[in-house]
Image: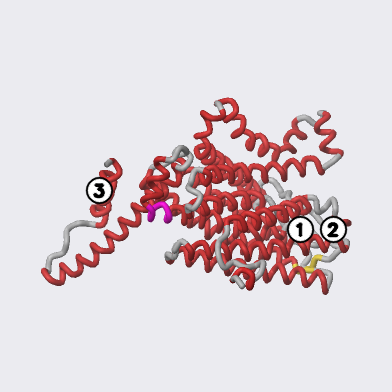
Amino acid sequence: MSKNSRTGVLSVSHYDRRKMLITFSIVMIALVIDLFISNIADIVSSQIVTFWGISLFVGLSVVCVVGQYLIIGMLKTKNKEVNVSSYNVKKFEIAATILQYIITAIMLFVILQIIFTHNYYTTLLSATTAISYGFVVFFLITLAYRFLSWFKISKSLVVLLYALAAIMICANAVDSILYFDVILFGKPALITPQSQVIFQTGSYPGSFMSLVNIFQAYSLNAYFILTWAGTILLLRHHLQRLGRIKFWAVITFPVIFFMSYYISYYQAFNPSSPVTAAISSNLLIPIFIITASITLCGIFFGIGFWSLAKGLPLNSRVKDYTIITACGFILYFNCAQATVLQAAYPPYGLANVSFVGLAAFLILMGLHNSAISVAQDAQLRKSIKTSTLHQSSKLLDTIGTAQMTREIEDNVLRMTRNNAATLTEQSGVEPSLTENEIKSYVDKVISEVKKK
């Protein structure tokens, strides 16, 4: 009997690209359903408290918990198979595992409370928001640091754009923790089937919470635009194939959809319009448009990295990490628009909020390990440079070369320090070269090698 047949369906004994994509697709469907219901929880509050509403919530939560286990397990296995075992990678894996255990415990506790006591603690929603978005900050501030260190070496615009996008996502995550938890602390300590479902989003103009709300909107717009600009640079190799008009039509599609997020402004500017009347008579229309638009934008951003994967060799380990990055972006843009501040019964939206940390982990590990893999594989770097899709693969080439430069500098500095200590001990003369001079010399050597 094979190892897979013994371990069963939840086996993560090896990385399988097909299993990863199937798991991602199932989880994504569950999260989209959870998101749509959470956004109209006040409208369908009488339906979701029924047996079928609670059963659907439990089913979606179980799918997401199992999905987290499989995705993290397969990514760990992938790292072992390709021998990506640096201290930082281990640290990230441990952090993701801790996040998974905490989120799983909270989700199961909420489910058990609902089944046996017919209520749940509001503090569990606050804890989930703080923990999940806290890990977003940890993972993506690390990624931003990596991007900035690669930009310092490569001076690549696309690297800078993704670095700034990661920084703005972190800023938005910190703001979300503050905004959501302050509102949740004003809710009843126990949520029951009789509790009101209210999306409390307003605040007094000029108050602290209004400033928090405004910053959240600005930071959301900022990381959307930065990610969109970076994706354009990834996809610009399609310009000749599609033609200029079709290309710009495709890449402006997400912006048009994203602007639907501000559909309420149209109602204020043109209150007598038939469109305004239709929206006011059926709130499901704008809610559906807004929710779908951001999810579709996330899919578009994921396509940018999917296009990178298409140009890589089928058995390339970087291909898998690039696909993982694409999945991370799609998950994050879908999950980050969810909220639990309405405190519905049962708490639809909780599954999405619990997934933002894992989505950030996938983005970090996908890009970080892609850079390491390219840096350590000269044949792959050559393949990327000679690929027909070289322009779309330029990001991988850039971060891989920058990572290689960093590793060479670190190794040279480490050997220099060791040899300097030995030389000083033997001769009594300290070397005159500083670390900056050594780095500058290494950069010149690498630049000359690249030219040849």
Could you tell me if the residues under marks 2 and 1 are in contact, i.e. CB atoms within 8 Å?
Answer: yes
Q: Which residue is mark 1?
A: 348
Up/down of 383 relative to 143, above or below = above
User: Residue 85 in the image: x percent, y percent?
Assistant: 44, 65
Up/down of 98 relative to 22, above or below = below
Image quadrant where one finds the N terminus: bottom right
Q: Is residue 441 magenta?
A: no
Q: Which residue is mark 2?
A: 48
Give the image quarter of residue 256.
top right
Q: Residue at x 52, y 50 (%)?
A: 322
Q: Residue at x 44, y 40 (%)?
A: 387
What amino acid is found at the position of numbered circle 3 in the picture?
Val
Q: Residue at x 50, y 43 (%)?
A: 311
Could you tell me if the residues under marks 2 and 3 are in contact, i.e. CB atoms within 8 Å?
Answer: no
Q: CA distance from mark 1 to mark 3?
A: 57 Å
Q: CA distance from mark 2 to mark 1?
A: 9 Å
Could you tell me if the residues under marks 1 and 3 are in contact, i.e. CB atoms within 8 Å?
Answer: no
Q: Which residue is mark 3?
A: 445
**Of callouts 1 and 3, the N-terminal one:** 1
* The one of 381 and 61 positioned closer to us in this rendering: 381
- Which one is in front in this view, the residue at disc 1 or the one at disc 3? 3
* The one of 429 and 316 positioned closer to us in this rendering: 316
Q: Secondary structure at mark 3?
A: helix
Report the number of discs.
3
Principal secondary structure, stretch drawn in magenta: helix
* The one of 319 and 27 positioned closer to us in this rendering: 319
